[in-house]
Amino acid sequence: MGSYPFHSETMNFVQLTLDDLQAYSATISDQNREEFGEPQFKPSQKSIRAVYEAMKSGQWFTKAEISFHSKLPEHSVAARLSDLNKKGIGHERKKAQEGSLYVYRLAQNRS
């Protein structure tokens, strides 16, 4: 059947389960990541892309710094970091050297 949701010679559509569709979507996402070297974001995911772009240098940032660079409020940055995790783009967190602030960076093992 290949990696398409229909048989290409007869164009007969087959019944797919949600698991089939999620696996197909994950396969396409992985292929895009390998081909283009960066994660793909939907147009509706502008704020997630903004946080990714602000952090992709690999440096450590506070939420305030990510907020400044992404032009998003700090409380939104926390939610977008969670959204990046859901897309398989993890982040690391550690306590800043002074004070009670935490700093964040994209995980080093990302694709």
Image (cartoon, rainbow, N blue to C red):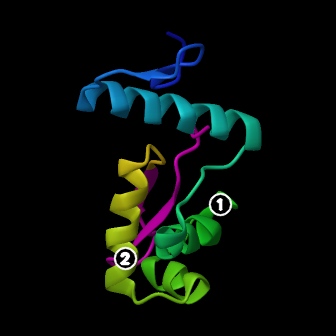
Residue appearing at x 25%, y 32% in the figure: 18
The residue sitting at the right extreme is 36
The residue at the point 46 percent across, 85 percent down is 64
Q: Residue at x 44, y 52 (%)?
A: 92
Seen from the viewer's position, the closer of residues 83 and 3 is 3
Front in this rendered view, residue 105 or 21: 21
What's under tag 1, amino acid-wise?
Lys
Indicate the secondary structure of the residue bearing disc 1. Answer: loop
Q: Position of residue 6 (x, y in %)?
A: 47, 22
Q: Which residue in the structure is indicated by mark 1?
A: 56
Give SS at disc 2: loop
Query: Please, is residue 11 above or below residue 87 in the view?
Result: above
Q: Is residue 73 magenta?
A: no
Q: Position of residue 95 (x, y in %)?
A: 38, 64
Instruction: Say what amino acid the circle numbered 2 marks.
Output: Leu
Q: How many residues crowd around disc 2 within 10 Å: few (fewer than 14), some, or many (20 or more)?
A: few
Q: Is residue 9 above or below residue 44?
A: above
Q: Which residue is mark 2?
A: 101
What segment carries the magenta color? 91-111
Q: Could you tell whether 39 is left or right of 14 in the image? A: right
